[in-house]
Image (tube, rainbow, N blue to C red):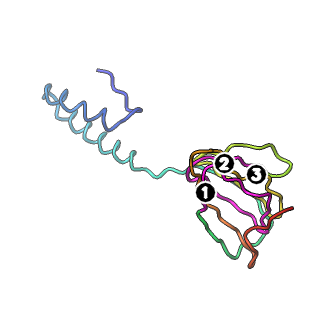
Amino acid sequence: MTINFRQNPFATLIKLIPFIMKKKKDIVLLIIVSFLISNAMAQQNEITRKNLESALMDQKVTKVEIQEISFPPGQTAPKHLHPCPVVGYIKSGSVLFQIEGKEPMILKEGDSFHEPKNVNIIHFDNASKDKEMTFIAFYLKEDNEENEKMVH
């Protein structure tokens, strides 16, 4: 019998129980399997962390404003800037994102972004013509700056 704990350790160990019960030779084996099952269950419940974004800022943050923002299908944002740094992530859908002087990119669900303070945002557009896009934005404020300014 081949045992593969990497794919799904809990399911693999459960499959071993009938094998052990048929043999009934070694109670120690049953104890070992029980121990491995409890370890596998603990591993499935581990907290994991994934670094999404790192951004350096030369600013004292005294207030964070968090917004969930939704764009209907095909919605584009006008050229704008933020008087404070903004970090966020795409909750659903996809975004055509471009900061002035940088290449445009597509951000998908789960991707993060950083919009630097006082830098023009050329595109922050719903990339889909038929699906809504939602993102979470964290406005890192030093004082009572407004969230955005339109650029002409």
Of pointers 2 and 3, the one earlier in the residue sequence: 2
Residue matched to label 3: 123
> Given the image, on which type of amino acid does mark 1 rest?
Phe
Q: Are marks 3 and 1 in contact (CB under 8 Å)?
A: no
The local crowd at label 2, few if under 14, some if 14 to 19, many if 20 or more residues have their Cα within 10 Å, is many
Whole-percent x, y for residue 15 in the image: 25, 31
Residue matched to label 2: 95
Callout 2: SS: strand
In depth, the one of 95 and 36 nearer the eye is 95
Residue matched to label 1: 135
Q: Are marks 1 and 2 in contact (CB under 8 Å)?
A: yes
In which quadrant of the rendered image does the C terminus lie?
A: bottom right
Which region is colored magenta? 69-98
Whole-percent x, y for residue 113 in the image: 69, 53
Image height check: is 63 above or below 49?
below
The residue sitting at 62% across, 46% down in the picture is 94
Number of numbered markers: 3
In which quadrant of the rendered image does the N terminus lie?
A: top left
Of pointers 1 and 2, the one earlier in the residue sequence: 2
